[in-house]
Image: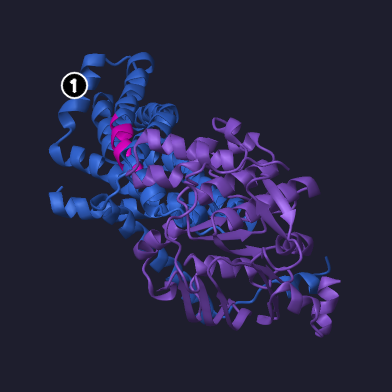
Chain colours: A purple, B blue
Amino acid sequence: MATPSLPAEAPLSRSQPPSGPVIVFEDVSIAFEENVVLDGISFTLPHGETKALFGVAGSGKSTILKMALGLVKPDSGHIYTLGEDVTQMTEDQLFELRRNVGIVFQESALFDSLTVRENVAFRLMEEAKTPPEEIEHRVREALRFVELENTVDMFPAELSGGMRRRVAIARAIITQPETLLYDSPTGGLDPVTSTTIVELIIKQRDVSKTSSLLVTHRLQDAFVMASHYFDTKAGHMKPVPPGGKIEAPMAFLILRDGKIIFDGNIEELAHTQDEYIREYIS
Amino acid sequence: MAAGDFLSSIELISPADFAKRKIQSLQDYSILAAESVANLFRKPRYVADMVQQMDMIGFGSLPIVLASVFFTGAALALNSATTLSRFGATTVIGQLVSIGIVRELGPVLAGLVVAGRNSSGMASELGSMIVTEQIDAMRALGTDPLKKLVTPRVVATVVMMFFLTILGDFMGLLGGSMVANFLLGMNAHEYWSNAWQTLVYSDVFMGLAKPIVFGFIVATIGCYYGLSTKGGTQGVGRSTTEAVVAAMILIIMVDVFVTRFLMVVLGS
């Protein structure tokens, strides 16, 4: 897919990227009624890295994303997002933090009574700090990033599944967040559309240097992200050349029975001796 | 399904757990109701959303409220005439319809009709937003769903219930007037004069205080059940039904207590 490169000023990228981990889970546990979903998990998402979360259905992948954003509180443990302990914050305090963390929900979660423009502009309109002309400019810029500028006046019901995911990505990036959380962004999509979405995620990672957690069931998506980078001059993703001059900052985390059984890069994953993981990736 | 399978599929809850769940629900509802009022004094205030809800709740409910109270007023006049004629007192129909509609039937009928139409609508709308993660998305985008969705609905329902009841009361009296004029041959001036003169301050106050309470019940119950939805589209259906049932039962129950309370306060 040939995607347009960002303007020279790259307004969708941040001017002062922070250092250090952006998300830290420390001994986090959560149960729903009698069912223990996560049992004392700990992991770190370093700045600039994309970490793909794998696990069978119901293993707590989406719950991890919601906990990172403070939408769900854990039963025990601490979660630090951009240096703030979200387990100790009130909802009002979390609203400010969430400005710097974008999320793309599993089924897009677009507001079906609002147009694409209103969906993408939702946060800016709610904050009521940005002039309407500036909002319009940023909405169009975000939609241009996902190549859907022509859908600005359409309603979500008029869009295909893949288009809705792309609008959800545009909505998530409009405030130029430091971190992005993707919940099965390619789930239920055809291979071509999935590749489009994967390329957008790679583009966001490599152009805007955004850290992200990515929940997915599709191993091939994560492998593409680990083996490709976004070439801004060419305007599309390319395989990472051998020699280590260009790196794709990608890690993998696998959950099983409420525990983390793997947390490492693609090399470590390829050489693991764990039978379950070998079967999982085969 | 065999009887054994059916029995084994039923989730057994201990009385203690059942009580805990009910108390938890009551606590959650109380918090939502309190927050919906407290949000009136916090920014941002969603005035445009309030006006939009007023249009949907108020004007949307207008025809059915007017029709239901109109025909109830007519039926009340008919039934009263049968009894009053035995005592040769059909001239007081206007007084009876007036007191009955303004103090009791107008507010309660309007409350029940608005509950049937709007508690269900709110529960299904918010329930759908829950199951499609739109509420989570709203929170993730820095907006408090209680401020954005619940408070405008509560304000709109309370305000519009007040005016719907006034219009409903008038239609109820008009229904009684139609029966008195055309079926019982009463003089219209006599009917309206009796109906007007019998009303005292406490009757009107009681008739206008109740819709405020009922409006609050309709909106908070609808929103509470909507935001408590669990279990996909089936859960949305369940929430919708429960919201209507709970709102209607509460209106009828609370009506007794509000009536007694106002009678004591107003000394009527």
| Residue A21 located within the stretch drawn in magenta | no
| B201, above or below A27, in the image | above
Q: Nearer the viewer, residue A113 or A61?
A: A61
Reading the image, the residue beneath label 1 is: B193
Screen quadrant of the N terminus of chain A:
top right
What is the quadrant of residue B159 in the picture?
A: top left
Relative to A94, A101 lies left or right: right
Screen quadrant of the C terminus of chain A:
bottom right
Relative to B103, A159 lies left or right: right
Q: Tell which subunit mark 1 falls on.
A: B
Observer able to see residue B219: no
Q: Which residues are magenta?
A: B157-166
| B22, above or below B145, in the image | below
Find residue A232 and report its horizontal and vertical position in percent: 63, 48
| B10, above or below B132, in the image | below
Find residue A207 and report its horizontal and vertical position in percent: 57, 53
Which secondary structure dominates the residues rendered in magenta?
Answer: helix
Q: Nearer the viewer, residue B22 or B182?
A: B22
Q: Nearer the viewer, residue B174 or B9?
A: B9
Residue type indicated by callout 1:
Ser
